Amino acid sequence: MKRVVVGLSGGVDSSVTAHLLIEQGYEVIGLFMKNWHDDSVTISNECPWLEDSNDAMIVAEKLGIPFQVVDLSEQYKERIVDYMFDEYSKGRTPNPDVLCNREIKFDVFMDIALKLGADYVATGHYCRKGEEIIDGKSVYKLLAGKDNNKDQSYFLCQLSQEQLSKALFPIGELTKPEVREIAKEADLITAEKKDSQGLCFIGKVRLPEFLQQKLQPKAGEIVTIPSDFEQYTKPSPEFKNKEESLKYYATKFSYHKTDGKVVGKHQGAHYYTKGQRKGLNVGGTKEALYVIETDVNENVIYTGEGKSHQGLYRNVLFVSNEEIHWIREDLTLKTGETLQVEARIRYRQTLENATLHKVETGLYVEFKNKQSAIQEGQFVAWYLDEELLGSGVIS
């Protein structure tokens, strides 16, 4: 009998995951990961880790499986929280959820599971796993979940073949309403429980306050760039080759305070990210202001009026060699090769047509349509049909 360790989070998805695995004849163990214990930054009555671990325990009892809580807050702080602070202080926008899967759930947590004699680790992600024998060996595939509204393959875009080989995603074939239905029938207390929001496992965090603990406030100016700014309208130069044009279009616009007018003050450029609209507190404009660039060295936030402001849009991005990750190692592009894919630069985004261009120094992702708020530090993930082939950190 194969043994599976399920990451029970106290939510409906992982509860049903455990239930389905029992039905499929696995021996199941439930583990709750405690990844956070600093209550000073969570919104206390909304900080549900105690409540969640309690719910997870009740579900485990109901299902008749062993249960324990593992404290991973040390590793979480080192690998996720410190990395977040570091990225924000550089003016980049990290994605803690993608990292949490790569570094915590499918690494630290997986190690614990394997020490417990587990054959697999299962999570309540809406995605599926495929397997194909290629050149005599098993190749694992990460496929989108059946529920288009909930597909979470993006969050697992940094997993390796090794990690995938030991992963199970039992609810990937189901839609959210079906999952709730199964939970009701199995009489699990999480059946009606609302989906958790906020950082993976921290609960709801007041982000500015969370960041302020490490990043000191620093007053600076908010500058608005006009929509007819010269860099947006100047004609493109002549390019000697494709790589030169990709490099040109992947380069972000650069601004100086003199390019626009000062319209307000802020408490620190490192608290803002590209595409952000809330929290600027500047009135008197026809359309809402959006952050189009942050300069953490000069501590200036550049904004543009309206969500169609040209400063928000680019159609090429670059991933450096050390940040390229192929789940399908057998499909890795060599320098000079291209591949037609669909790609997304954030979790809920619809997949967009794109071409990958492998060059000596890294990989260009060229979108057919311009993308809004391409943000350094975020992950771009590329797909063929339903399969997520690889991903990279936008540089």
Image (spheres, rainbow, N blue to C red):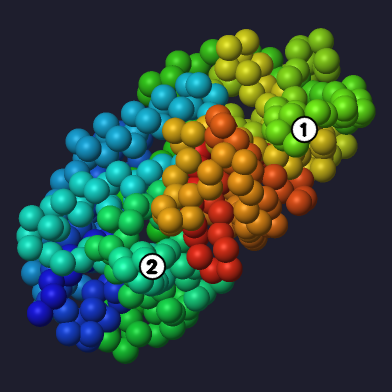
Quadrant of the rendering where the C terminus is positioned? top right
**Number of on-image labels:** 2
- For badge 1, the amino acid type reads Asn
Residue under numbered circle 1:
241
State the residue at coordinates (41%, 49%).
158
* Identity, as a three-letter code, of the amino acid under mark 2: Ile
Q: Residues within 10 Å of mark 2 (few under 14, many from 20)?
A: few
The answer to which of marks 1 and 2 sits earlier in the sequence is: 2
Q: Is residue 394 above or below residue 349?
A: above
In this orientation, does residue 170 appear? yes
Q: Residue at x 12, y 58 (%)?
A: 114
- Dot 1 lies on which element? loop
Q: Residue 18: which quarter of the image?
A: bottom left
Picture coordinates of residue 115 (x, y %)? 8, 55
Q: For the residues marked 1 and 2, what is the alpha-carbon distance in whole angstroms?
A: 36 Å
Measuring from the top left, give residue 125's x and y in whole percent.
38, 65
Q: Is residue 247 left or right of residue 171?
A: right
- The part of the image, by quadrant, that contains residue 236 is top right
User: In the rendered image, is residue 199 in sight?
Assistant: no
Residue 109 drawn above or below residue 131: above
Quadrant location, the N terminus = bottom left
* The disc label shown at residue 134, or none: 2
Using residue 384 as the reference point, say whether residue 44 is left or right of it.
left
